[in-house]
Image (cartoon, helix red, strand yellow):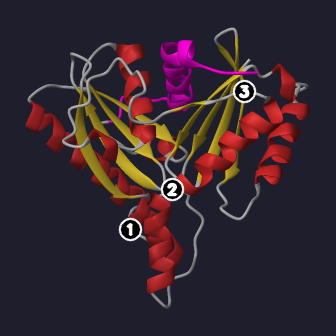
C-alpha cells in the first residue's frame, strides 16, 4: 500500500492507495507542537479504524510546504513504518517542464496539482487551490507549468476581519440567501462568499485574456465546493487532485525508493 501525505499550513491530508485505488483519506489540523511520536500515534489510529495495519504500508511520498514538519514526517515513515519516503522537492521527476523563473520557489503542492490535472485532462488548465492561500496555476496545452497568482485564503480573510475590526464577530462560513446583508453576520458571509467568488472569476478571466486560450478550470482544496457553486468560471471540483498527483509522482520516482 502507498501512503501519500500532503502537509499544508492549515491541514495535513493523508491518503492510502491500494493497487492504484484510493481506499481512504483523512484530514488533520497542522500543528508544529506535536512530536514525531504523536503524529505516529494519530496515523496508526486512523489506519486502525479502517483495519489497515501500519506495516501494510510499503511505500510513501510526502509533499510539504511547512519545512519544520518535513523531517518529523520522514522520521515517522522511517521509524514506525520502516520505509524511506519520496519527498516532492527540486530534482524529483515530474515529467512537466517548470517555466517559473526560480523553480525552487514553487510550492510542492502546486507542482503536484499541476501534474495531476494535466495527467487527467491533457489540455491547458487553470488550477485554483483553496488552501491557507488561494493559488492560481496555469499549465499550457503542452503540459508546461507556466506560472500563476497567489492571494490570501478565504479563512485568512475571514479571520482578519474578526481580528482587525473590533465590532465584527467570528462567523460561520455559509452562503447567505442574498448578497445584501440584513445584519452583520449576514453581511460578512455575503462579502466573503460572493466577493471571493468574484475574485476567483476575475483572476481566471484575466489569465484567459493574457494566454489567449480557453483553459479548463479545476478547483481543489477544502472550500472549493463552496465557491464553485457561485463561480462563473470553475468547470470542475476535484477533491482528490493533490492525493492523485502524489500517487503519479510516486510512480515516476519509485525506482529511486526505499529501504525496509
| Residue hosting label 1 | 180
| Residue hosting label 2 | 175
The residue most toward the bottom is: 166
Q: Nearer the viewer, mark 2 or mark 1?
A: 2
On-image quarter of the N terminus: top right
First-in-chain label (2 vs 3): 3
Residue 173 image-quadrant placement: bottom right
Residue 89: x and y, percent?
Answer: 44, 36
Q: Is residue 239 magenta?
A: yes
| Residue hosting label 3 | 83
Looking at the image, which is closer to me, 135 or 190? 135
Residue 133: x and y, percent?
Answer: 42, 55
For the residue carrying disc 1, how many other residues have a C-alpha within 10 Å: few (<14), some (14-19), or many (20+)?
few
First-in-chain label (2 vs 1): 2
Relative to 51, is 99 on the left or the right?
left
Q: Which of marks 1 and 3 is in front?
A: 3
Is residue 252 placed above or below 139 in the rendered structure? above
For the residue carrying disc 3, how many other residues have a C-alpha within 10 Å: few (<14), some (14-19), or many (20+)?
many
Residue 78: x and y, percent?
Answer: 74, 35
Q: Give the range drawn in magenta.
A: 234-260
Q: Residue at x 31, y 48 (%)?
A: 200
Q: How far apart in space, not on screen, are marks 2 and 3 (Cα)? A: 44 Å
Tag 2, which secondary structure? loop
Q: Which residue is drawn at 41% across and 21% down?
A: 93
Amino acid at each position: 500500500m502507498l501512503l501519500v501525505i500532503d502537509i499544508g499550513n492549515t491541514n495535513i491530508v493523508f491518503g492510502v492507495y491500494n493497487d492504484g485505488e484510493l481506499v481512504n483519506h483523512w484530514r488533520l489540523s497542522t500543528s508544529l507542537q506535536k512530536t514525531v511520536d504523536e503524529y505516529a500515534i494519530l496515523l496508526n489510529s486512523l489506519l486502525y479504524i479502517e483495519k489497515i495495519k501500519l506495516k501494510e504500508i510499503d511505500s510513501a511520498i510526502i509533499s510539504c510546504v511547512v519545512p519544520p514538519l518535513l523531517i518529523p514526517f520522514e522520521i515517522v515513515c522511517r521509524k514506525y513504518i520502516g520505509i524511506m519516503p519520496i519527498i516532492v522537492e527540486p530534482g524529483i521527476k515530474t515529467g512537466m517542464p517548470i517555466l517559473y523563473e526560480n523553480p525552487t520557489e514553487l510550492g510542492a503542492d502546486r507542482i503536484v496539482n499541476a501534474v495531476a490535472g494535466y495527467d487527467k485532462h491533457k489540455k491547458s488548465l487553470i488550477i485554483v487551490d483553496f488552501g491557507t492561500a488561494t493559488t492560481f496555476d496555469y499549465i499550457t496545452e503542452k503540459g508546461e507549468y507556466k506560472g500563476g497568482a497567489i492571494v490570501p485564503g478565504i479563512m485568512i480573510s475571514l479571520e482578519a476581519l474578526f481580528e482587525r475590526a473590533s465590532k465584527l464577530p467570528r462567523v460561520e462560513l455559509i452562503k447567505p440567501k442574498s448578497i445584501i446583508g440584513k445584519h452583520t453576520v449576514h453581511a460578512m458571509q455575503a462579502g466573503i462568499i460572493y466577493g471571493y467568488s468574484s475574485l476567483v472569476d476575475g483572476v481566471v478571466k484575466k489569465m484567459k485574456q493574457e494566454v489567449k486560450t480557453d483553459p479548463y478550470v479545476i478547483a481543489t482544496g477544502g472550500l472549493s465546493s463552496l465557491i464553485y457553486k457561485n463561480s462563473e468560471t470553475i468547470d470542475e471540483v476535484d477533491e482528490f487532485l493533490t492525493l492523485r498527483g502524489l500517487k503519479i509522482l510516486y510512480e515516476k520516482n519509485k525506482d529511486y525508493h526505499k529501504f525496509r
